[in-house]
Amino acid sequence: MSLLPGEILPQSVPLGTSDGQGNVTISTNWWLLIYNIALNSIGNGGSIPDTALEIWTLNQIDAATVTLKPAAQPIEVITVGTSPFTYTAPYDGSVAVTGPMESSSSASVPSIVLTRQGTSVNTGFLNGSIPVRRGDEITLTYLNSVAPTMTFLPS
């Protein structure tokens, strides 16, 4: 039988009472909740719970050298629209541009332009990978009837 209340305590339940001299006594239900969270989180006597310790030991993991990183996000193929086409990066990463960008029958100049916080810079190349930050815009001006390929690679 658990000593915890059968439901999460509502916000209206006071955390404790004050004796008027600055001393606060925590209510029994709140104390039991905090005690059980601490017991289940850090174990008995301040040590790591056996189950967590066993997992680390069985897998021969050295906690001092482990760097937990989130899994890499999937690569996104960008559907390129008509020229000029602008893509806005949803988060940090790189945009790879490949494919036809030139046409000898036109007087226009193809370009890849990076815009960050209102400042635009012509990259000076027609194919390649452009590092981007969240909110950066890549604008393609291409001359062929076939659009180049764009791919977003999240960091």
Image (cartoon, helix red, strand yellow):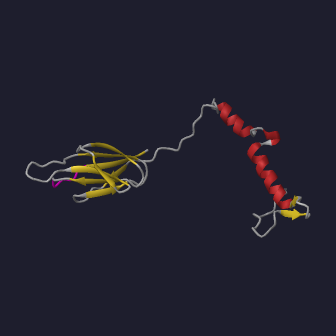
Q: Position of residue 80 (x, y in %)?
A: 27, 56
Q: Is residue 104 left or right of residue 72?
A: left
Q: Main secondary structure of the magenta part?
A: loop
State the residue in front, 148 or 23. Answer: 23
Whether 146 is among the magenta residues is: yes
Q: Is residue 68 left or right of residue 117?
A: right
Give the vertical position of 22 relative to 73 (above or below).
below
State the residue in front, 127 or 24. Answer: 24
Give the vertical position of 72 relative to 59 (above or below).
below
Give the vertical position of 21 relative to 49 (above or below).
below
Q: Position of residue 140 (x, y in %)?
A: 25, 53
Q: Is residue 108 left or right of residue 87?
A: left
**Which residue, as the protein is rendered here, is positioned at the far left?**
105
Give the vertical position of 151 relative to 3 (above or below).
above
**Which residue, as the protein is rendered here, is positioned at the far bottom?**
12
Q: Which residues are magenta?
A: 144-148
Residue at 43%, 48% (x, y): give it. 92
Quadrant including the N terminus: bottom right
Whether 104 is among the magenta residues is: no
Quadrant including the C terminus: top left
Q: Position of residue 9 (x, y in %)?
A: 77, 65
Residue at 57%, 36% (x, y): give it. 67
Residue at 78%, 42% (x, y): give it. 43
How many marks the image carries: the answer is 0
